[in-house]
Image (cartoon, rainbow, N blue to C red):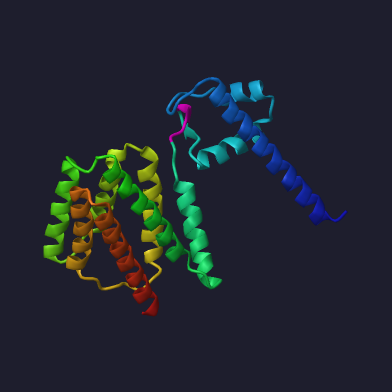
Amino acid sequence: MTAARTRGRATRGRSSRTEEVQQRIKQLILERGLAVGDPMPTEFDLVEELDVSRNSLREALKALQAVGIVEIRHGFGMYVGSMSLDALVDELTFHARISKRQGRDDLAHLVDVREVLERGLVEQVIDRGLAAGNTELDEVMRRMDAEASAGQVTPETDRMFHELLYRPLANPIVNQLLGAFWDVYRTLQHDLAPVRQEASDVAQRHRDIYEALRAGDRQAAATAMAAHFRGIRERLEQARAD
């Protein structure tokens, strides 16, 4: 057996062992009914309880920390982590950049997914009668109009508008997922040539969505959302052409 094959088997063995320890740690969290932010057993206690080596435990904890399941606060201990999509953002961004070299356009695909998600969500807000009384959305729409009059709608205001659209659904995963898509999109935009866009057009597309939502008009909301994403695609195509 060659040295390379021996090293390969050893690496697979360590990887399998690390994954096994990860599963056991997750099971321990569930069995003990620990919640986000709760302290976990110490590293010493986990080594004893799980009957694993310190190295295997540390590799597993590092992997769990990367996906937000475990939070390690140096000097304080380990805690059950809160949900994070940072790893998803990194992976989507990395593979989207690779896809460009392979003749694919994962950024455009990401916009497609986001459109399907947002159109369905805005319809849910309307169908559940949750469109009225969102004073924060009213304020952000006014801010966007003011920014457009000054010549530029900021990314922060744009992002807040979309977050507030769906806040009445009280679904914490929605904004995290949309936020992840937004982070990938904004990061990858830097790879493209800057696009000149009229701030008034940006604000008007958002106002069309806003007014359809306020009127509880599903069809108008779908039409406005489609126009909004059509504008995004046009800007992407223009940036690629430049």
**Residue drawn at x 64%, y 21% as measured from the top left:** 49
Give the image location of residue 147, x and y in percent: 15, 60
Q: Determine the residue positioned at 42% across, 61% down.
A: 112
Left or right of residue 141: residue 94: right
- Comparing 82 with 181, the one in front is 181
Residue 124 is a magenta residue? no
Residue 8 located left or right of residue 148? right
Is 114 situated above or below 238?
above
Left or right placement of residue 193 versus residue 152 in this view: right
Please tell me which residue lies in front, 150 or 145.
145
Indicate whether 35 appears above or below 161: above
If the image is split into quadrants, where does the C terminus sit? bottom left
Residue 35 image position (x, y, % from top left): 45, 25
Q: How many marks?
A: 0
Q: Which residue ends up furthest to the right in the rendered image? A: 1
Residue 132, relative to residue 57: is it above or below?
below
Q: Position of residue 137 (x, y in %)?
A: 19, 46
Magenta region: which residues?
76-82
- Of 108 and 88, the residue lying toward us: 108
* Viewer-proximal residue among 73 and 24: 24
* Residue at the (14%, 58%) spot, across then down: 145
Quadrant of residue 182 within the rendered picture: bottom left
User: Which residue is the extreme one toward the bottom?
Assistant: 242
What's the residue at 65%, 21% (across, down)? Answer: 48
Q: Position of residue 196 (x, y in %)?
A: 26, 73
Query: Within the image, what quadrant is residue 58 found in?
Result: top right
